[in-house]
Image (cartoon, grey):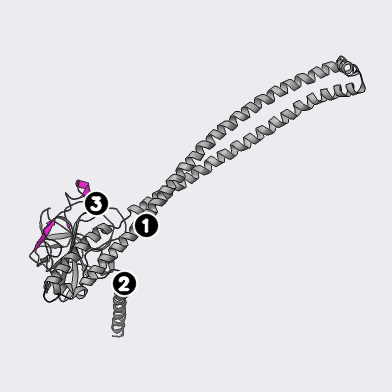
Amino acid sequence: MMKKHLKNIIHSFLLLLVIGSYVLLPLQTHAATDTLGALEDELNALKKQKQENDAKQQQTEAEIEAKRKAIANAQSEMKKAEEEIQAAEIKIEESNQKIAEMKEKTEKLLVFLQQMKGKNAYIQYISGASSITDMIMRISAVEQITDSNQKIMEELEQLIEENKKLKEELIQKQKDLEVKIDNYKQSIATLNLNLSTYDQYEVGIVEKISQAQSSYNAAKQVCENNPNTRGLGRNARLDDCYNTAYNAGWLKPLNQGYITSTWGYRTSPITGQVYEFHNALDIGGNKEGTPVYAAAAGIVGGFISRYRCGGNMLYIKVNVGGKQYTTYYYHLLTVNVSVGQVVNQNTIIGTVGGYSTSTSHGGYDSCTTGAHLHFGVANGWYNSSIPKNQVITPPGFQNRQGYRFYSRTDYYG
């Protein structure tokens, strides 16, 4: 009995920890668009973000251009160093030839002097002086010739050493420049990566602004035309403007199908990335063109056309059981509704795509390889860019690969 009581306490404690972990999840800087003012704020925030992104992009592109110029300068310096090495090699060769010539002349001079000494010619040359001054001049002349040759040889040898040192310095300079160029190239590769890196299913800023603008325009018109919300301006609640239908429960978005990829962390079938967060269920088992229905009645909040990762992406704001949700449908072949349109659970909002639309089959969508529906649900109302901590497992589904359903009312509780 004691063990059972202790087990219940531990179970309750663990349950509190799990609940607490969800309560304490960090809040993200995304606001649910439940009022016209919030919708306008989101639009303005996106425009500001684009300005900041553009500034960062320009800065990155300027850095890339600076690195490219640095590479060109380094390559120019390398070419100049090569020319200087060749010039140094020519000087060394010329100096070696001059040394060889001077050595030959000096050796001949020494031989001549030795011969003169042997034949008393040197003494005769000296003693033949007309005066002491003349004799000193004759002795000095012989010594000067010898010393001059020796001095020239020493200068030439010093020049050779200097040229050799210069050549070594230039070779080292070339190596340093090669390292610099490699570093510049790596920097450019990193900067280019910064320009082209996007998260899977993360909508680009231009597309976000476009759909946020269309969503705001449509909502503003509806709010101004509705007698109950006319004149409220930014304070008008969107569900009041649209007279949002109350949904008692959920229906499946397809008449039948099975789960090919679950909600949550997984290894991406596209990129092979380990521990990638998949923010929806992938539903297969239907050919392209199969009708897709709204899982709950609501308002079309956003639509992204032919996005490079997600294809045609549709966002519908709904109210189920008195709580606001956003449902989203990706990889659609066709879209039959427009932003601001009110839909019910029998509305065919689009058709299944994902095969002909995939880049692997000549299409535009790089995040699909076969026909399927990417179906997700999030707490709150959004037009796109849904915070990860608001995404939930779509109600009515078993989050298990291979789980199959056979009707829109086949609810798993």
Q: Quadrant of residue 159?
A: top right
Residue type at mark 2 is: Leu
Residue type at mark 1 is: Lys
Asked if 181 appears above or below 319 in the picture, the reply is above
- Residue that numbered label 2 is attached to: 27
Element under disc 2: loop
Identity of the residue drawn at 14% across and 73% down? 241
Q: Residues within 10 Å of mark 2 (few under 14, many from 20)?
A: few
Quick check: 189 left or right of 246? Answer: right
Q: Residues within 10 Å of mark 1 (few under 14, many from 20)?
A: few
Chain part drawn in magenta: 346-375
**Is residue 51 inside the magenta stretch?**
no
Q: Quadrant of residue 249?
A: bottom left
Hey, which residue is sitting farthest bottom in the picture? 1
- Residue that numbered label 1 is attached to: 56
- Tag shown at residue 366: 3
**Is residue 364 inside the magenta stretch?**
yes
Magenta segment main secondary structure: loop
- Mark 3 or mark 1, which has the lower sequence index? 1
- Mark 1 or mark 2, which has the lower sequence index? 2
In which quadrant will I find the N terminus? bottom left
